[in-house]
Image: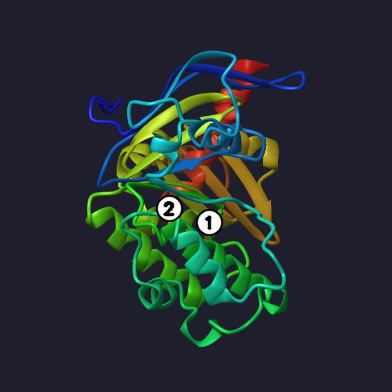
Amino acid sequence: MPSDLAAIASLRRVSKRMGTTLALNEVSLGIRPGEVTALLGPNGAGKSTAVGLLTGRLLADAGTVDLFGLDPRRPAARARIGVMLQSAALPDVLTVDELVALQSGYFAAARPLEETLAFAGLSDLEDRRAGALSGGQSRRLQFALAICGRPDLLILDEPTTGLDTDARRALWTTVRDTADTGAGVLLTTHYLEEAEALADRIVVIADGRIVADGTTADIRAGTAGATIRCRTRLADEVLASLPGVRRAQRAGGEVRILSGDAAATMRALFDRTDDCTDLRVETASLEDALSTLTNTAQKEAA
């Protein structure tokens, strides 16, 4: 696991219950400057709980939470972060430029207003009231509020939900630029292509525990293997029993097999049937790797 000695924000052996659910179970995680860290995992894995702890909105039941060497609830620590949550209520009657100007006033070295609006793709909407924005425009405004203070740590919780393709890619550029200036970025997302495009480091969480930490290539190489696609009438239970197979799925007429040993799987497949057509072997995707990791974690927790 990468060293977090230079972390600007960290969880150290942190546990947190949300009601009767153990949302985080002795999790240790550090966010480093100049690096985009993507925190990935299924719904309920603990991602939003980790964000809540790092931003001081939640308190840990056990362990230590550190933000720039301070308690995350301290104003001196919070003044150095920008946060974009999954949802946020905005005053309907204020205009876009009024809201950004108001938020910018809390920071000593805020970006110029027009620069923030341009980075968030809001230059042509500055006079529109927040209550008249579309869902995607509202998300862009929330992003503007997160970046206006030139944060040393930018925390983005599902930032591109509701954005169209152009707006999503424009936001990616700004996020990458933010990291390149030396800020740390923590990103949670369900869009795996977003994680692949942005993240220097991917941390996978499942059932409240971190199950993988590394680059996209590290995680693929360590867990995923290869994906075999073909068309065959061979029964699903036979496919699932082939050597090396981690998962076999059928969609329409095509079978998709995730294998840790593609050569052994294909040899066994050809031994059992001669009706295999449209055969393709591909490097397994990040989605395949995450599925393998989270399924394994869930089985171990059961």
Looking at the image, is 213 positioned above or below residue 15? below
Residue 243, given in percent of the width and then of the height, sits at 49, 30
Q: Residue placed farthest to the bottom in the image?
A: 124
What amino acid does circle 1 point to?
Answer: Tyr
- In the picture, measured across the screen, residue 238 lies left or right of residue 9, that is right
| Disc 1 secondary structure class | loop
Cα–Cα gap, marks 2 and 1: 7 Å
130 lies left or right of 50? right
Label 1 sits on residue: 191
Q: Are the two marked residues, 2 and 1, in contact with CB atoms closer than 8 angstroms?
A: yes
Q: Residue at x 53, y 37 (%)?
A: 51
Please, what is the three-letter code of the amino acid marked with disc 2?
Answer: Ala
Q: Quadrant of the N terminus?
A: top left
Q: Position of residue 282 (x, y in %)?
A: 40, 54
User: As rendered, which of 224 and 170 lies closer to the eye?
Assistant: 170
Q: Residue at x 60, y 62 (%)?
A: 161
Q: Is residue 295 left or right of residue 40?
A: right
